[in-house]
């Protein structure tokens, strides 16, 4: 497996066509050719090596398919999750949102910062919509938005954060992808796929 994500190296989304891949490689080759960067020849040669390696993977259909089908590029679904929007099992009972007597009395003496409220029903609905939209590449941006809404409704949802990062990655929004995977990694530090993707998508060195 490549040390860096080949799409990131060539600065193209994973939905890129073969022609777009070829065009990106040609542009990067011209930009980083050592003969045109003699003042930074060593760094330029390293960048060219990365670009060539990335192109060799993405220009070969079998190698590209093998790369794309790795398990860390799959959407994550909570264990026991049902994809039906109408399903409401295992949801927390929503709070009425009205302060109790103790809260009212406390508010007379201490200014209490309101805690972020979760909306499990909304989180589940947006998450389910996001899953549905991941079936087609043309809907990836919409899926990304739905997972973002699910994150807002439930900030502790590991799967929503991970899938937000994944859809950002698939649409070529690499910085946002890192945001999603970083959040997922904070929620579940033991998840190796989040760490792996953060390593593959680490920020590029700028020449």
Image (spheres, helix red, strand yellow):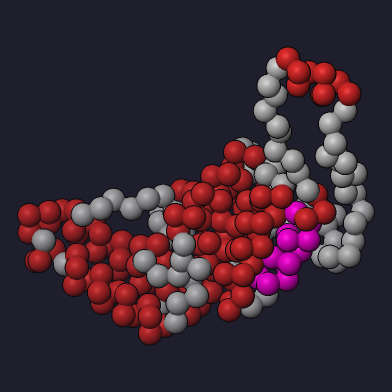
User: What residue lies at 22% left-to-right and 71% top-to-bottom?
Assistant: 29
Magenta residues?
123-134
Which residue occupies the foreground of this view, 114 or 140? 114
Q: Please say whether residue 155 is one of the residues in the magenta stretch.
A: no
Q: Measuring from the top left, give residue 55's x and y in whole percent.
A: 35, 72
Q: Measuring from the top left, give residue 145's x and y in whole percent.
A: 61, 63
Q: Measuring from the top left, give residue 133's x and y in whole percent.
A: 68, 72
Q: Quadrant of residue 69?
A: bottom right
Q: Measuring from the top left, give residue 172's x and y in whole percent.
A: 46, 66
Please tell me whether residue 39 is drawn above or below residue 109 in the rendered image: below
Q: Is residue 150 left or right of residue 173?
A: right
Visible residue check, residue 63? no
Please tell me whether residue 72 is drawn above or below residue 114 in the rendered image: below
Which residue occupies the foreground of this view, 60 or 155? 155
Q: Quadrant of residue 59?
A: bottom left
Please tell me whether residue 119 is drawn above or below residue 24 in the rendered image: above
**Identity of the residue furthest to the bottom in this view:** 19
User: What residue lies at 73% left-to-right and 67% top-to-bottom?
Assistant: 129
User: What residue lies at 58% left-to-right and 79% top-to-bottom?
Assistant: 138
Visible residue check, residue 184? yes
**Identity of the residue furthest to the top in this view:** 109
Which residue occupies the foreground of this view, 150 or 199? 150
């Amino acid at each position: 497996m490549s040390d860096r994500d080949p799409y990131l190296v060539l600065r193209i989304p994973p939905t890129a066509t073969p022609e777009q891949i070829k065009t990106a490689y040609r542009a990067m080759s011209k930009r980083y050719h050592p003969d045109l960067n003699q003042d930074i020849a060593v760094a330029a040669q390293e960048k060219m090596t990365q670009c060539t390696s990335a192109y060799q993977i993405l220009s070969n259909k079998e190698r590209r398919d093998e790369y794309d089908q790795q398990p860390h590029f799959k959407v994550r679904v909570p264990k026991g999750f049902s994809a039906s929007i109408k399903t409401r099992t295992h949801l927390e009972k929503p709070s009425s949102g009205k302060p109790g007597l103790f809260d009212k009395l406390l508010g007379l003496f201490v200014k209490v910062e309101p805690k972020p409220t979760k909306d499990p029903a909304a989180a589940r609905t947006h998450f389910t919509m996001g899953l549905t939209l991941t079936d087609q590449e043309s809907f990836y941006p919409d899926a990304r938005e739905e997972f973002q809404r699910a994150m807002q409704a439930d900030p502790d949802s590991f799967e929503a954060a991970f899938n937000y990062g994944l859809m950002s990655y698939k649409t070529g929004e690499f910085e946002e992808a890192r945001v999603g995977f970083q959040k997922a990694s904070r929620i579940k530090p033991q998840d190796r796929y989040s760490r792996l993707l953060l390593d593959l998508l680490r920020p590029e060195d700028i020449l």
